[in-house]
Image (tube, rainbow, N blue to C red):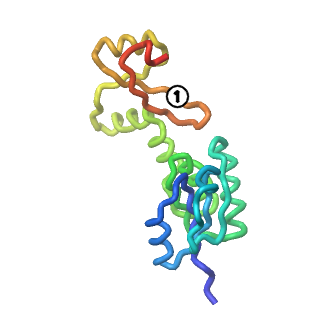
Amino acid sequence: MTRPRRVLLLTNFQIPELFDALAKRGRHVVLLTIPETFNRMALPPCVVHAETVDVVDQRAVARQILRLHATHDFEAIVPVMEFGLLPAALAAMQLGLPTPSVRAVQNTRDKLRMRRVLEAAGLGQVRYAHCQTLAEAGSFWRLRMSACTRRNFSLNSSSVIRSVSETLAR
C-alpha cells in the first residue's frame, strides 16, 4: 500500500484554486495558517490536519514544521505567505525537501540586500537610498524621490514605505 502524498501549505489566506489543484493531483494538505484565517475558513476535504502558526517567531515556525513532518511525513513545503518563506527554507533544508535556499529567501525578503545582490550581478537599479535617519531621508526627498525603506525588526524583513515628506515619515 502506498502512503498518502502530502504537502505542507503555509498560507495567510484561503485559496480555493490552490486546494482544488492539490486535490486534483491526489495530494493531502497539512495546513499552517494564521489564527484570523483559520477562524473564518471552512477546511477543504483535502486538508488532513490544520493548525495555527505565530509568524513572529520564525525559528519556532520552523520547529513546528519539523514536528508536523514527524507526524504527517509530507513530501513538500509550499509557503504561500511571505512570512512562511524563511521557516519553510530552514525546515526543508533539515528534511532534505526541495525549497528555495535560505540565502535566496533572505535576499528576496530584504529589499536593500536584494538591490545589492542585483548590483553585484551587474543588473542596474532604480535610484534608491538606504536612509537610517530622517536627515538622510530629507536629502533623498530633495532629489524628488518619494520612497524609503524601513526595517521591520519583529519579522526580520525590510518593508518599503512611500513618503513624500519628513512629517509623513514620522
Closest to the observer, 23 or 106: 23
Identify the residue shown where x is 48% and y is 14%.
133
Callout 1 crowding tier (Cα within 10 Å): few <14, some 14–19, many ≥20: some
Q: Is 151 left or right of 116, judged from the image as shown? A: right
Q: Mark 1 points at which residue?
A: 151
Q: Position of residue 31 (x, y in %)?
A: 61, 62
- Asked if residue 27 lies left or right of residue 71, the reply is left
In the image, what residue occupies the spot 54% across and 55% down?
A: 11
Q: Is residue 165 above or below residue 29?
A: above
Task: In this rendered view, identify the residue nearer to me: 166 or 5.
Answer: 166
Q: What element carries label 1?
A: strand
Q: What residue type is labelled 1?
A: Arg
In the image, residue 41 lies at what x, y percent? 58, 60
Does 31 appear above or below 130?
below
The quadrant in which residue 4 appears is: bottom right
Q: Position of residue 62 (x, y in %)?
A: 65, 52
- Is 95 rendered above or below residue 28? above
Q: Which of the image's four quarters has the N terminus?
A: bottom right
Q: Position of residue 72 (x, y in %)?
A: 68, 70
Q: Please, is residue 166 above or below residue 38 in the view? A: above
What residue is at 50 percent from the left and 42 percent from the top? 106
Q: Residue sitting at 63 percent across and 82 percent down?
A: 3
